[in-house]
């Protein structure tokens, strides 16, 4: 019975975060409408909707992550290392080029998928339009590039993996959190690459004992997704080759200049 409880508890960070976001969204809408009806807030209906969305997306994930952190804090592992992790320049460079390499590889794959599965790709494009990535604004960029990486790394890597590690080895915990992370995107295309990305980000949590590297990589991937997406297949291939070569080069520099930070160092296994 205890084992079953531990397994079911793995889903608590995700479920609790969704409940918190839903309730916060509902309360946010009611608050804005009340202030508008009381004459405290002024503006058109569209302006009030934009204000409601801005408040929700910029503060809702932060509040949700804080609630989940408090609820799951007794499961947390490697808590002190988050404060002590200080990536050197070489490590940041590795995360930067790894991020854009992943983004260019993804662009190449999606270009091929758009030709093979046009209906699926159309649904994916509509999803990107809904979250503001097709025509990014300051608000959608801040939410997608800064807020989302922090929120998602706390919920899926820090909390979900920490809870899962109480009842299973790391490799199983990593697979499970990546599956939950992928399913949370509620789109076949996004769910597929989010699962793979979740595995990489989970590895970073295992490797560095911290969510900070995952936040950095997640930040660079999302940032390049907003501003560095190539326009055609040939450009994708060229940019992928360049970024992959740069990644290899900075990995060699990292191994020589900052060996303790080397991405593939294997002498720190989780208990």
Image: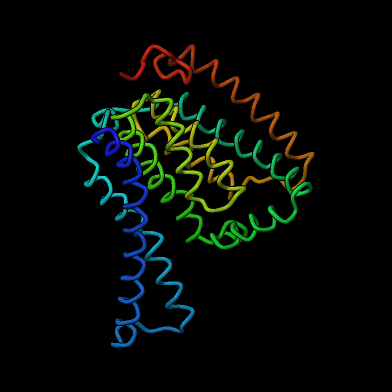
Residue 20: give x, y in percent of width and height. Answer: 31, 58
Q: Quadrant of the C terminus?
A: top left
70 up-or-down from 249: above or below: below
Depth order, front residue of 208/22: 22
Name the colour scheme. rainbow
| Quadrant hosting residue 143 | bottom left
Q: Residue at x 32, y 64 (%)?
A: 24
Q: Residue at x 43, y 31 (%)?
A: 174
Q: Left or right? Give the position of 202 relative to 17.
A: right
85 up-or-down from 34: above or below: above
Farthest front residue in view? 1
Depth order, front residue of 250/200: 200
Depth order, front residue of 189/32: 189
- The tally of labels here is 0
Q: Left or right? Give the position of 145 relative to 17.
A: right
Residue 265: give x, y in percent of width and height. Answer: 44, 15
Residue 259: give x, y in percent of width and height. Answer: 43, 13
236 up-or-down from 208: above or below: below
Q: Left or right? Give the position of 248 relative to 182.
A: right
Q: Quadrant of the N terminus?
A: top left
Q: Residue at x 55, y 35 (%)?
A: 196
């Amino acid at each position: 019975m205890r084992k079953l409880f531990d397994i079911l508890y793995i889903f608590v960070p995700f479920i609790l975060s969704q409940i918190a976001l839903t309730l916060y969204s509902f309360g946010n809408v009611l608050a804005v409408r009340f202030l508008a009806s009381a004459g405290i807030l002024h503006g058109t209906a569209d302006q009030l909707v934009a204000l409601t969305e801005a408040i929700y997306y910029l503060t809702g994930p932060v509040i949700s992550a804080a609630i989940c952190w408090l609820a799951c804090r007794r499961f947390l592992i490697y808590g002190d290392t988050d404060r002590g992790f200080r990536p050197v320049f070489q490590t940041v460079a590795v995360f930067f080029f790894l991020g854009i390499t992943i983004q260019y590889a993804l662009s190449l794959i999606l270009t091929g998928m758009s030709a093979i599965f046009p209906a699926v790709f159309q649904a994916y494009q509509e999803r990107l339009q809904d979250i503001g990535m097709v025509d990014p604004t300051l608000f959608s960029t801040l939410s997608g590039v800064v807020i989302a990486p922090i929120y998602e790394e706390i919920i899926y890597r820090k909390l979900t993996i920490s809870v899962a590690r109480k009842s299973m080895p790391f490799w199983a915990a990593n697979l499970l959190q990546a599956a939950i992370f992928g399913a949370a995107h509620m789109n076949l295309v996004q769910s597929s690459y989010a699962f793979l990305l979740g595995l990489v980000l989970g590895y970073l949590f295992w490797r560095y004992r911290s969510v900070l590297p995952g936040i950095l990589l997640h930040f660079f991937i999302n940032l390049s997704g907003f501003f560095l997406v190539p326009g055609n297949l040939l450009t994708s291939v060229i940019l992928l080759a360049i970024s992959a070569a740069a990644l290899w080069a900075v990995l060699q520099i990292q191994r020589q200049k900052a060996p303790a930070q080397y991405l593939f160092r294997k002498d720190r296994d989780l208990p």
